[in-house]
Each structure stands twice: as C-alpha cells, then as structure tokens.
Amino acid sequence: MRTSIRNSICLACGLLALSACKKDFLEKDPTELLTADQIAEAGKWNEDVALGFVNGTLQTFFKSLQSTPSSHDDFAQKAFDIESDLMSGDMELQGGQSYGWFTSVANLLSYQKFETLNYSVWRISYRTVSLANGFFRSVGSDESVPEKQNNPKTLYNWGQVKALRALAYLNLAHFYGKPYSDATKSSLVVPIYRAADDASKPGKLATLDEVYQFIVKDLIQAADSMDKSKVVRSNKQYLNATVARGALARAYMDMGQWEKAYDVANTVITTQAKNYPLIAAKDILTNGFNDYKTPEFIWAININEDNTGKLVSFWGHMDVFTYSYASVGAFKGINANLQAEIPDTDLRKGWFNASRGLPLSKFFSTAKPTVQGDRTWLSDIVFMRMAEMYLIASEAAARKGDEASAKKHLLTLLKERTAADNYAAVETKINGLSGDDLLKEILYNWRVEMWGEGFSLTVMKRFKIDIQRSGRNIYYPNQIIKWDDPRLTYQLPQNETSNNPLIK
C-alpha cells in the first residue's frame, strides 16, 4: 500500500492538468485537485479517479506544509495535537526557543487572528471540507448516496469522506469554539459548508450547536454507510465504521451527552476489543508508537518515502532519536507537576525520562538508542487507538452515575499499564473510589495515557481544571493557567474576517 495514495492522487491531478480551474472563495476548492464535474466524468471510466479524491481528502490530515510553504510546525493533524497539548500546559516547551516553531502556542499567543498557526488550523480544516464536498458533488449528494451510485465501493468511500469532513469540523470546534454548554451553544463559531452550497460564495457563521449537530449527523451516516457497504478496508490508513464511531464518541463527550457517549464507546469496546487489543504491559515501554500496524491502533498512517515530511513532522518535533528539532534542543516534555503524580506502580512512568520528562520511551524511532540516528523520517503516526475508547467509556459512565461500569473500563486499561505484581493493589484502590475521587482518577489517566496525542486541551476544558505549569516550561513557569482563559480559544483568522462580508 506504499504508493496507492500517491498514485491515485497523481492520476486525478494528471487529468486536471488538461483543463483550467477556477479559484473559489477562500480556496475552498484547492486548484491543484479535481473539480467535482471533472471527477464525476472521469470516474465513469476509471474508478481510481474517485479514489484519488478520497485519498486527497485523507491526505489533508498528514501532509506537511499545506498551509504555509516554509513553516516547520505545519504538518496538519499531528501539529494540531502538539498545539493543543502545549496550550493546556501538560506538554511543556523546554528549549529551542531560537527555532521559533510552536513558540507562539507555548507562549499562548497563537489564539490571535493574525498568527500563522491560528490560520493553519482554519485553512487545512476547510481544505478537508472543500475536497469532501467535491467528492459528494461527484456522486450526487452529501445527504444520501444516489441509487445509481449505490454500490459497495461508493457507499464505503462516501462514509469515509463523511467521517473526514466531520473530523475537520471537530478540529474547528475545538480551536475556535468555547466548550459546549447551555451558555455557549448559541454562540457563533465557524461557517458550515455543505456540498450543495455555492463554493464561490462565503458562508455565515453557524452556532456551536449547529456545528456539533452537523458533526454528529455526518458521523452517524458515515458509520452506517461503511457498515452497509460491507467493504473491509485494505489498510489502517483508511477509515472504517469503528473510526467513525470513535469520533462520534468524542463529539458526544464534548457535548456532555454522557449516555450517548457511553453507548457508542461501549459498543466499540464490546465489538472491537479483540480486533484492537490494548498495547500489553510487557510492550508498553518498547512499542514506541512508531508502527501503524500496532494492533491497538484503530486509525494510523504508514509514513514512507512518498509522504514523509522529514524535518517537518511529529517525529521531528517530539523524538530525540530522529534527526530534527527535538534532537537539537527544542525539547517537549511532560509537565513536571503531572510527572510527579505518576506512581511507581504505573508503568507509564517509564515513558518519560526523570530529568526533563522527555517521552524517550513513549515516542521513539527504531533508531533508539542513537540520538539523531533516524535520518529517514519513516516512523508512522496514529490518529485513534483503543485506549481512548476505554477512557471515554469510563468517564461517561462515571458522569452518568454508573460507577461500576466506569471502574470496569478503567481497570481494563490499567491492567495493561501496571506490573502484574502491583495490579491487585491498583484494583483495590480503584474499586474503593467514588464520586469526585473516581473522576479525578479518570482525569489523571486521560492526561498520562493520552499525553502527546492531542487530548489535553479538550480534557482540561471538559473537567474545568486549572493547570499549573512547571519550572521547566520556558513560558509562564510555575504559573496557573485557568481552563477558561480566553487565550485557549482561537480568534477567527484575519484572512477570513477581512474577506468574508458575512462575518461582522
């Protein structure tokens, strides 16, 4: 599968070279890819053209330098993950200030409308939306698959693209919207663009509730469509119904719909745990999160010579064993205060080195133990894994009053994060918790288990916790950042507000 994404995109772009393209409003239809009419026509004789559109949409989640030609903190979803963890303070920038990458985020300045990283989230997310809508127009609709196109591959691809569009809007909601509540759900956040909309015209801002309802609808339809297709994905790089349901559980957690979040996450666990078993305790310090084939990974990308971002990558910024920024001093480590909370009985304590809290045993290239040893930049990236589903199920169950289920799911995770001779004590501890104490334990596990994977900011806001940065952070050392600090919500980009007359 090494070149399948590249080849299908190249086929699509080759056809495009034969004709001119219009420039739509705010680049919602990027000119380097096919228009909907072209792809619909070409797809009559070569189904790989439609696949090229799907792959083009997928690629917006991992291609480097999509938003800016020279910003080395521009590599799509994994850059967004670093941004949100740095903003929360659970990840700390400890050095390398002279390089400039991610410094505006760590310094809580990236929220400003003229900041490059602010615009990067917007631009890449709406590129995903644009390509998705182009695909939907090519098959007829984003509301339902037309009967004439109702074949297994179309159903499957339609579901994939539905989920990708929803994930793009989930990013927009997380960065540009305040946490969902009765007080905020009527606030205006970002425009919603549907396939039937005129791509040359700007859109008005939708409310936070409208955005989340749009996300939920897309994800439900995505899962149903992929299930109905009965197509088995060829590779973990592509999406399936489990990915869509995992994203749906995320959305329900954002909305505080605990019953629905639990039902979805519990369904994923019940039906898919055997397919995506948790990384075992014996492997937790040696896995490295560098292989997309890791059984626990639900959705992951195979990074190869064709799609590597090289220096401009998650591994370049996080792993000292990969030649890039982290290896020359731009260190990113766990908050020292959070690190101090990790007990000796928790195997994840070994993820982080003692002096700086660098993730030397969580994220590492196969070149370990040689610092800068990896100069091929081929470590893979993960977007979703089963541990998240256990944490969602545990938290949602606790919040809806089902503490027995909350403990069951949490203990399933902790059994693989605890040495066998210590597990009985951990089990006794968890079973003795209730109420706020149980929620605090779940919070701790979110922050440690998912560290560096882009969940810290949403968890911080959902739990309404203020986080004290440690003395290792080069910005705001030892200062407390409140969960509702306005700097944790992005302003609408200046490029959008200057060009969209529907935004006042």
Image (spheres, rainbow, N blue to C red):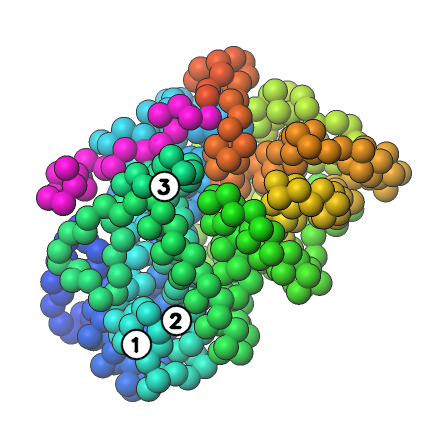
Q: Is residue 213 above or below residue 346?
A: below
Q: Amino acid at mark 1?
A: Val
Can you identify the residue that label 1 sits on? 139
Query: Which of the labelled discs sits on residue 158, or is there none?
Result: 2
Q: Quadrant of residue 367?
A: top right
Residue pictured at 87% horizontal, 38% vertical: 424
Sequence-wise first label, 3 or 2: 2
Residue pictured at 14% horizontal, 37% vertical: 504
Element carrying mark 3 = loop
Q: Position of residue 78 (x, y in %)?
A: 45, 44
Q: Position of residue 491 (x, y in %)?
A: 27, 33
Q: Is residue 177 above or below residue 22?
A: above
Sequence-wise first label, 2 or 1: 1
Label 3: few (<14), some or many (≥20) within 10 Å?
A: some
On whether residue 258 falls in the magenta region, the answer is no
Q: Position of residue 106 (x, y in %)?
A: 41, 25
On whether residue 497 falls in the magenta region, the answer is yes
Residue pictured at 27% horizontal, 41% vertical: 188
Q: Quadrant of residue 189?
A: top left
Can you identify the residue that label 3 sits on? 185
Nearer to us in this view, 198 or 310: 198
Q: Nearer the viewer, mark 1 or mark 3?
A: 3
Label 1: few (<14), some or many (≥20) within 10 Å?
A: many
Q: Quick check: can you spot residue 167?
A: yes
Q: CA distance from mark 1 to mark 3?
A: 33 Å
Element carrying mark 2 = helix
Quick check: marks 2 and 1 in contact, CB under 8 Å?
yes
Q: Position of residue 35 (x, y in %)?
A: 21, 69
Q: Which residues are magenta?
A: 483-504
Nearer to us in this view, 229 or 393: 393
Nearer to us in this view, 285 or 163: 163
Q: Nearer the viewer, mark 3 or mark 2?
A: 3
